[in-house]
Image: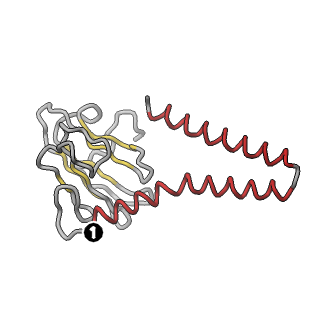
Amino acid sequence: MTSNLRSYRLRARRWALAVICMSLLASAGGCGLLREGRAWLYGLEAYIYGFPLIMMDLTKQVSTAVPTAGEITAPVNQFSVMTKYADASFRAVVRTGLDTLFATAWADLDMEPLVLSVPDTNGRYYVIALFDMWSNVFASIGKRTTGTRAANFLIAGPGWQGTPPADVNLRPYPWWPR
């Protein structure tokens, strides 16, 4: 199932729940109940929107509260790199592939952007997925999207205004506007 389909189904369930609740409250006949129902729905919407942000922030705090990089934890703007395959008892990542090595980093882009340098992998498959705080992949660097040659990629926050270095690939995807 694609992520778009999952997202659509989640939104459809949310709206169905809202419609059912609003109809029940409207049939109850009281204006006070209708206002309370709206408040409840706004609270539900805030929870659905905000809870992932809280969980990601807690995950970040736990993952980055270390002085040096390790197998699954590292300070902000540093990679943690797995050096051996996980066994069946590995629980740091939900539903991990047992034949996959992971490297993770939490990027702080408030003050300045980061440049991610990727070496030439000589045709070997790799992927670097960039996630937002709702765990949506907003960009993907790897064999399928950017190729396997060595490259530098600028990762900047939405408010960054500056001049990127000359050797940075600003268009990792051919369809991105110039």
Q: Please name the residue that numbered disc 1 is placed on.
A: 65
Toward the viewer: 127 or 73? 73
Query: Which structural element holds mark 1?
Result: loop
Vertical order, 23 against 64 (above or below):
above
120 displayed left or right of 89: left
Q: Residue at x 36, y 56 (%)?
A: 156
Q: Residue at x 20, y 44 (%)?
A: 151
- The x, y position of residue 82, in whole percent, is 16, 50
- The x, y position of residue 51, in whole percent, is 50, 56
64 displayed left or right of 41: left
- The x, y position of residue 144, in whole percent, is 27, 31
Q: Residues within 10 Å of mark 1 (few under 14, many from 20)?
A: few
Q: Amino acid at mark 1?
A: Ala
Q: Residue at x 22, y 56 (%)?
A: 72
- The x, y position of residue 168, in whole percent, is 25, 49
Q: How is the image coloured?
A: secondary structure
Specify the farthest residue to the bottom. Answer: 67
Q: How many numbered marks are there? A: 1
Toward the viewer: 172 or 78? 78
The N terminus lies in quadrant: top left
Specify the farthest residue to the front. Answer: 89
Q: Residue at x 35, y 67 (%)?
A: 111
Q: Quadrant of residue 119?
A: top left
The C terminus lies in quadrant: top left
Q: Quadrant of residue 109?
A: bottom left
Vertical order, 23 against 125 (above or below):
below
